[in-house]
Image (cartoon, rainbow, N blue to C red):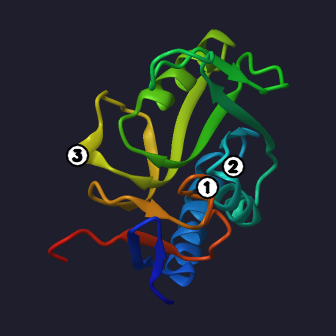
Amino acid sequence: MKTIEIDDLRFEPFISYEQIKKRIRLIGVDISLKYEDKKPVFIGVLNGCFMFMADLMKEITIDSEMSFVKVASYSGTEQGHISQLIGVGLDLKDRDIIIVEDVVDSGNSLKYTINALEREGARNISVCTLLLKPSCLQHDFDNIEYVGFEIEKEFVIGYGLDYNGLFRNLKDIYKEVTLGN
């Protein structure tokens, strides 16, 4: 893995694809055991989750369904104001849902997504996230059940995570190198 530089930012290797695959394999086993007789619906939150969700679903050995949603805000609103959940396309009434996220930091979009899915009548909602930044959380969650890696406030790219739309395609995850590191 090499260092990446763009727009006066420098990123260094952080989590290798091999580490990611091992962790996803364990999460897949856990989910498959817990939901063995339940046929859960996996709801991926786009755009960042697509690589994680694809690899996770390869490790799920039970009957399940999947869909994707996108969290959107009306143009012209302040940053962080979430106004719409686009995409589910399935009847979620009385279903077990597993939300798949790339990263949970503030938790604002996750809170909105959970509330929207609850309004759809979901019986149970669990969260599976590749990355969790506990020190950044602005909400309390008791349903984040599957976490790939807990990280600090690092700015990360790769494996679905982007910088201005770039670098989602990298296999590994890189973190920004800050002055003093």
**If the image is split into quadrants, where does the C terminus sit?**
bottom left
Considering the numbered disc 3 on the image, is that residue within a helix, a strand or a loop?
Answer: helix
* Location of residue 56 by image quarter: bottom right
Front residue (pair 140, 5)? 5
Q: Residue at x 62, y 59 (%)?
A: 160
Considering the numbered disc 2 on the image, is that residue within a helix, a strand or a loop?
Answer: loop
Q: Residue at x 22, y 46 (%)?
A: 135
138 above or below 101? above
Q: Residue at x 68, y 61 (%)?
A: 51
Residue furthest left in the image: 180
Q: Are marks 3 and 2 in contact (CB under 8 Å)?
A: no
Q: Are marks 2 and 1 in contact (CB under 8 Å)?
A: yes
Q: CA distance from mark 1 to mark 3?
A: 30 Å
Q: CA distance from mark 2 to mark 1?
A: 5 Å
Residue 43 location (% of width, % of height)? 69, 38
Residue 81 location (% of width, % of height)? 48, 18
Residue 62 numbered tag = none
Q: Which residue is mark 3?
A: 135
Q: Which residue is mark 1?
A: 33
40 above or below 111? below
- State left or right for residue 51 relative to residue 7: right
Looking at the image, is mark 1 or mark 3 earlier in the sequence? Answer: 1
Q: Residues within 10 Å of mark 3 (few under 14, many from 20)?
A: few
Q: Which residue is mark 2?
A: 36
Considering the numbered disc 1 on the image, is that residue within a helix, a strand or a loop?
Answer: helix
User: Is label 1 or label 3 in front?
Assistant: 3
